[in-house]
Image (tube, helix red, strand yellow):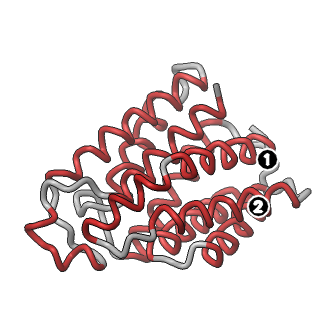
Amino acid sequence: MEIQAVKRAVSAVYEKMAEQKDYLIQLDQQNGDGDLGLSMCGGFGALCEALDATEETDFGKVFLMASKTFNEAAPSSLGTILSFGMMGMAKKLKGKTEVSQEEMAEAMQAGVDNIMEKAGSKVGEKTILDALVPAIEELRRCGGEMAAGDVWAAAAAAAGQGSESTRQMKSVHGRAAYYAEKSIGILDGGSVVGKLIFEGIAESVR
């Protein structure tokens, strides 16, 4: 995998966010401020432009740039959280101009580890982590046994299942935490973003 694959993946993710912008806004209006769809489109749109403009081939430097770009273009709590993830990936991939599927899975793991450390959150708290973590676990579990397209499709399916599980969780972070018990039964918008990220990547690989 080279940087061109990252560019294709981010472009596909942006298309997913654009397609689902209104849905993300609707989800966020239930227990947030309703800007989720706008901020994710803004963040991934800016990321597409930045990646198209760069000739950098070092994965670490590219993800470092991506982290800064996304944080500036998506001024929201989830924008910051995703920038933490990209920062963790940047550190893991520093100096690499080619990465294997297994190395990318490990970099994503480093990304969610950084999110959990910086945000003080974990799986089961009705956040994007509930989609990202099972997807990455699936990547790491079957990465060496299946074709790339099948691996990423399996990861996307795991992300979807993880997102759906947030309906039964109580919000404990951010503005949604004010709703406490009332948040049970509501699908978490951040987890849907996590699902869309993996669906976009899977489509770009296929």
Query: Closer to the camera, 40 or 38?
Result: 38
Q: Look at 59% across and 20% down and name the residue there.
A: 147
Q: Look at 18% across and 79% down and name the residue there.
A: 178
Q: Is residue 179 left or right of residue 36?
A: left
Q: How many marks?
A: 2
Quote the CA–CA distance across marks 2 and 1: 8 Å
Residue type beneath disc 1: Ile
| Label disc, if present, on residue 62 of the rendered structure | 2
81 vs 185: above or below: below
Q: Earlier in the sequence, mark 2 or mark 1?
A: 1
Q: Which residue is under mark 1?
A: 3
Q: Look at 48% across and 70% down and name the residue there.
A: 81
Q: Position of residue 60 (x, y in %)?
A: 73, 61
Query: Closer to the camera, 174 or 150?
Result: 174
Query: Closer to the camera, 141 or 200?
Result: 200
Q: Are marks 2 and 1 in contact (CB under 8 Å)?
A: yes
| Label disc, if present, on residue 59 of the rendered structure | none
Residue type beneath disc 2: Val
The quadrant the C terminus occupies is top right
Q: Position of residue 114 (x, y in %)?
A: 48, 68
Q: Position of residue 79 (x, y in %)?
A: 52, 71
Residues packed near mark 1 inside 10 Å, few (<14), some (14 to 19) or many (20 plus): some
